[in-house]
Image (spheres, rainbow, N blue to C red):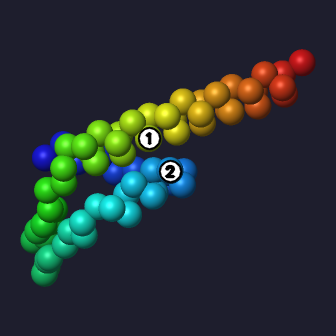
Amino acid sequence: MNCRILIRQPAEVCTLARKLPLGYVLGTGKTVRLLIPRIGSCLYRQILEASRVAIIHDEASVAAGISMTVH
């Protein structure tokens, strides 16, 4: 299904993610079914772009922190 899990995202990504429809997890015992509703391609692209921007900002802040601590 090529699903993605985004953990600890900034507010911009979370705001877009709140627009997603809820899915369901149904299961008993060893069998689990996931019911994932379809979303529009526009919303999907917006979430991916916001997460890419967040990754770039996060990497930049980590690099800035490393450059300040190395003497």
* 29, above or below 19, in the image: below
Q: Tag 2's secondary structure?
A: helix
Query: Residue 59, percent across and down?
Result: 59, 30
Q: Nearer the viewer, residue 44 or 34?
A: 44
Query: Residue 32, percent across and down?
Result: 13, 70
Per the image, the residue denoted by label 1 is 50
Rounded to the nearest angstrom, the CA distance separating label 2 from label 1 is 7 Å
Q: Amino acid at mark 2?
A: Glu
Q: At 20% from the left edge and 43% from the top edge, which residue is drawn? A: 41
Q: Nearer the viewer, residue 63 or 32?
A: 63
Q: At 64% from the left edge and 28% from the top edge, which residue is drawn? A: 60
Seen from this angle, which residue lies furthest front? 42
Query: Residue 9, percent across and down?
Result: 50, 51
| In-image side of 8 versus 18 (left or right) | right
Q: Tag 1's secondary structure?
A: helix
Q: Quadrant of residue 38?
A: bottom left
Q: At 45% from the left edge and 50% from the top edge, which residue is drawn? A: 13
Q: Amino acid at mark 1?
A: Ala
Seen from this angle, which residue lies furthest right? 71
Per the image, the residue denoted by label 2 is 12
